[in-house]
Image (tube, rainbow, N blue to C red):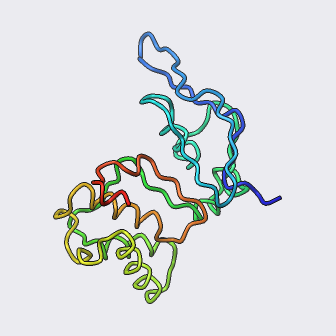
Amino acid sequence: MPQPALETQGLTKDYTVGFWLAKKRRSLDGLTMRVEPGEVFGLLGPNGAGKSTAIKLLLGLIFPTSGTAQILGRPVGDVRAHREIGYLPEQPYFYDYLTAHELLDYFARFFELPASERRARVNLLLEKVGLASAGKLQLRKYSKGMLQRVGLAQALVNDPRLVILDEPMSGLDPIGRR
């Protein structure tokens, strides 16, 4: 049986709130799940349910109070696993003076892709997200939906084995959601 793409056991996160009268608040309570390779999985729940906290824990951006998590068969803190993940945050931030081509090339360099492969991948991704004709425009001229699509392309630039998207439909119009 292949390694799961993602697996958690009893993942819990507590925060301390307040200063003088500090109280513990639990934002994630015992998350146990398993996602197989090739599976599409959605984490659904109301605001404040802990979805973004779970994602941050899985990416190693914050540490759990208790429990364990593995990505692609490795502990979440293992850098080798991070090279095989694509991530689109809920509110991505991009330097708005860059063009989409420049931004995607910048992120592709983190994965040490050769220049010819970077160019081909950037062009393909911009085409896939419907921004091929806008690739040379500065990002400050993009709508929120266009920026979200650039963010999706950025999450895919390294051809990841696992893609984690936090609120991926935010800002997309009905055509952009296709």
Relative horizontal placement of residue 174, taking residue 41 as reference (left or right) = left
Relative horizontal placement of residue 29, taking residue 137 as reference (left or right) = right
Q: Percent from the top left, x then y, of residue 90?
A: 39, 47
Residue 41 lies, with reference to residue 37, above or below; the image says above
Q: Nearer the viewer, residue 91 or 24?
A: 91
Q: Percent from the top left, x then y, of residue 171?
A: 29, 50
Residue 170 lies, with reference to residue 11, above or below; the image says below
The quadrant of the image that shows the N terminus is: bottom right
Residue 128 lies, with reference to residue 31, above or below; the image says below
> Which residue does the image show at 30% across and 60% down from the upper left?
175
Q: Nearer the viewer, residue 66 or 27?
A: 27
Q: Residue furthest left?
A: 141
Relative horizontal placement of residue 64, taking residue 9 as reference (left or right) = left
> Which residue does the image show at 39% across and 73% down from the upper left?
128
Q: Percent from the top left, x then y, of residue 32?
A: 69, 36
Quadrant in which residue 80 is drawn: bottom right
Total marks in image? 0
Quadrant in which residue 122 is drawn: bottom left
Q: Residue furthest bottom?
A: 116
The quadrant of the image that shows the C terminus is: bottom left
Q: Residue furthest top?
A: 21
> Which residue does the image show at 36% across and 57% down from the upper left?
177
> Which residue does the image show at 59% across and 46% down from the upper left?
58
Q: Nearer the viewer, residue 164 or 16?
A: 164
Q: Percent from the top left, x then y, of residue 137?
A: 20, 73
Relative horizontal placement of residue 24, taking residue 173 as reference (left or right) = right
